[in-house]
Image (spheres, helix red, strand yellow):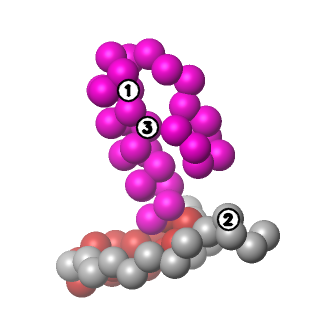
Amino acid sequence: MKGRFVLLAVRMPRAYVEFLDRLVKAGIYPNRCEAIRKAVRDFMFEEYERLEGGGGDADEGGGL
């Protein structure tokens, strides 16, 4: 699906990348990108809830 994703370059400490690789190797995530997307999505939902005072109906699909 063209336009659904945007390429984003991010610098991370080596230890973070090594841990991501462990999660992938353990089969928890299919690849680094999915693990990072999940982490960012969880962070955004947490912050959304904090900003909205616990209310709101955030969509798992990516749109807040």
Find residue 11 and report its image quarter: bottom left
Residue 37 sits inside the magenta stretch = yes
Q: Is residue 45 visible?
A: yes
Instruction: Judge depth for marks 2 and 1 and give the one in front.
Output: 2
Callout 2–callout 3 Cβ contact below 8 Å: no
- Image x and y of residue 28, in percent: 55, 62
- Of the two numbered discs 2 and 1 on the same chain, state the one appearing first in sequence: 2
Q: Amino acid at mark 3?
A: Phe
Q: Which residue is identified by label 3? A: 45
Side of 10 where 6 appears, left or right: right
Label 2 secondary element: loop
Residue that badge 2 annotates: 4
Does residue 30 appear left or right of residue 51 in this picture? right
Gap in angstroms between the C-alphas marked 1 and 3 = 6 Å
Q: Residues within 10 Å of mark 3 (few under 14, many from 20)?
A: some
Q: Amino acid at mark 1?
A: Glu
Tell me the residue at 44%/76% (across/down).
8
Q: Residue at x 21, y 79 (%)?
A: 13
> What percent of the width, then of the height, locates residue 48?
38, 33
Spatial CA distance of label 2 from label 3 is: 19 Å
Q: Which residue does the numbered mark 1 point to in the structure image?
A: 49
Q: In front: 28, or 8?
A: 8
Distance, label 2 to label 1, CA atoms, is 24 Å
- Residues at discs 1 and 3 in contact (Cβ within 8 Å): yes
Span shown in magenta: 36-64
| Disc on the earlier residue, 2 or 3 | 2
